[in-house]
Structures are given as structure tokens and as C-alpha cells.
Amino acid sequence: MSAAIHKQFLLITQREIHHIAKNPIYLFCMIIAPLFCYVFFTTLMSEGLPVNLPLGIVDLDNTSTSRNIIRNLDAFQQTKVIAHYSSFNEAREAVQRGEIYSFYYIPEGTTEDAIAGRQPKVSFYTNYSFLIAGSLLYRDQRMMTELASGSIGRAQLYARGATETQAMGFLQPIVIETHALNNPWINYSVYLCNTLLPGILMLLIFLTTCYSLGREIKENSAKELMKLADNSIITALVGKLLPQTIIFTLMIAFADAYLYGYLHYPCNGGIFPILFAGFLLVLASQAVGIFFFGMFGTLRLSLSASSLWGVISFSISGFTYPVMAMHPSLQALSNLFPLRHYFLLYVNSALNGYPMIYAWHSVVALLLFLLLPFLVLKRLRNAMLHYVYIP
């Protein structure tokens, strides 16, 4: 790099640092908003799973057996029995009002029918409008029903003279052992926050990049920027975005230190591959922001496109809904989102503990995003040199 180009970079970088220090929106988007999201989402799911979800009971049997079932159900960590209702309709109305997510219905004569071997039926009704709460309560109620059924069956076998081994062999002929890999705590925070927080930062990078470029045109200062860069759009972009690159890289490194160092989330492959993946995500996100601004040419449209692309990333990257279960066209489309490849690097390194070479295609994909600005350099240069913003 010649001394002249080095001086140009230095002047443009100093100019951008002055803009960042003077404009509060940079401070908010680059530091305050990410930090707030880090704390908000990790504390929101600090227990790993939602606990004490409100459940209602309709116990028309009202026997010691039914009361024992209710006590055991209330003992589950995710379930909290908050109300007893006298009828099905009363409990249904409570669900519709949002007072409870589910209710457990024990009809009259359940204990008598169970003792007589007449296969009584209990019911549980769940509001799946709240997917996580509904799923957790459904799981607990179903498990409690199976345990109660097994307990009654075991008592009947004991009464007929069966030994404990014979009774358990009849009730559970095949013993199933479950071993959760990589996230044995079944902690939603571990699963979600490791990709959700970088995804939020990616969205902020999209918006900040578009805003910083559009601001030059809006304030009619683009010609001054190009003059400092000797009309080189590459010099202008690199010098202008370098301070943002450093700050965003520090923010994603802070997120990694917070998640893996302070909260002790699993990082089986070591911290350096994750830091490298975060740095690639920052560069790829800036490249996408440049591409959107160069393609649309206006601040309003580029911000709208960046927001849309960033929000879709959370749905199509695979950490909320598996990509392999999507339509083939959406599976192909998912490769156009930087967050998708960061997620694959995170799973490969932090969760599975494999060397990054096994996810080389995701590294290459993030590097390919850096080619996007070259597709719009000519349009971007013309906009910087000739576009005049008229309020």
C-alpha cells in the first residue's frame, strides 16, 4: 500500500470515527442495542425452559388417587396447578381468557373403573396458540397419565401375586435410555441464544451499513468522501466501514465471551473458531448491506430491504425450523443468508466440537458474500459522485 493510499485510509477513517462519535444513532445501533439484547434474551431464558406454566384441573372423581395424580403433576418443574374448576366449560373459558394454557380433566368414576380394569379415560386440553407452553404442558400431562396408568397396573399385578421383576417386565418390556447430545440440559437458551444474538447483530450491521452510506448522500457529503478517496469507491468503502468493522467485531467477541465464558454455554471446539466465524459474519453482513444500498440507491429502500432480509434470516437459517424439512426451493434460498452459514459453523464447532475444516463450505460461503459489493461498485460510485439529494 502506497503512502498516498495509506493517508487516504487514515483521513477517511478519522472522518468516520468523528461521525460515529457525533451521531447518537451509531452508539445505539452498534453498542447499546446489542448489549441490551444480550442481557434481555439470556435473562429471559435464564432457567433454560419456561417454568411454572399455569395449568387448571377439573377433578370430577375427587378421590385419593385423583388427588395424588394432581399433586404429582404439580411437582413437575414446568407445570403449576393454579386453579380447580367444577366443569369442563368453566375450564375451557379460562383457557380462552388466557388465564391458563391447559387443563387436566379427570371424569367421575376414574378410580373405580381403573381398579375394576375397565380402562378409564382422562383428557387434557392444551392451547397450542402458545406453541412452547402448550408443548411443555402436553408433555407433562401425557407423562403423568402414563405414570399413573403404570402405577395402577403395577398395583393390580402385585395383588395377583406377581413379583416386582415380573410386574415391571410386563409393564415395560423394553427399557428406553435417552441421552441428549451436546445440550444434555435441554436448555432452550443454549440452543437459541447462540444464534439469535449474532442474528440480531447481523440485522443491526445491515441497517448501520446502509444508513452510513445513505447518510453521505442525504447530507450531500458523498463528494467530500470521494474526494478524500481520490474518487476510488473501494478506498472510500474500506476506509469508511473499517471503524464499524472493528466495533461490531468487538461486540460479537463480547457476546462469545459472555455466552461461553460467563454463562458457560458449551463450546466444545474452542473459542477461536467461534471468534473467527463471528468475524466472517460481520464482514459478510457489511457486504450484504453495501449490496442492498448499491442495488436500490436510496436510504429508504435499502433500509427496508435490509430489514426484510434480516428478519427472514431468523426463520430460514435453520435454528428455529430445520432447513431439511423445508421445501427444496427454500432449502436452496437459505444459502443466500449469512446467518445460515454462521449457524452451521456454530453447530459444527461449539456443539459438535469438530475442526472447522469439516464445515469449510460454510466458511467459503461467508467469504463469497464479500464479492457482492463488486456487483454494485459502479452504481455506488455514480451515486456518490453525481446523485444530489433533494429533501
Image (cartoon, rainbow, N blue to C red):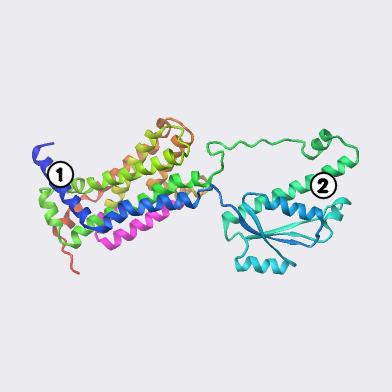
Name the image quarter holding the N terminus. top left
The residues bearing labels 1 and 2 have C-alpha atoms spaced at a distance of 78 Å
Q: How many marks?
A: 2
Q: Is residue 141 left or right of residue 389?
A: right
The span picked out in magenta is 291-315
Quadrant position of the C terminus in the picture: bottom left
Report if the CB atoms under discs 1 and 2 are less than 8 Å apart.
Answer: no
- Residue 268: x %, y % from top left: 46, 33
Q: Could you tell me what secondary structure mostly forms the magenta stretch? A: helix
Residue 183 placed where, x, y %?
53, 39
Q: Nearer the viewer, residue 256 or 287?
A: 256
Numbered tag placed on residue 152 in the rendering? 2
SS for callout 2: helix
- Give the quarter of the image for residue 252: top left
Looking at the image, can residue 288 be seen?
yes
Amino acid type at circle 1 is Phe
- Which of label 1 and label 2 is nearer to you? 2
Residue 56, relative to residue 154: is it above or below?
below
Write down the residue under mark 1. 9
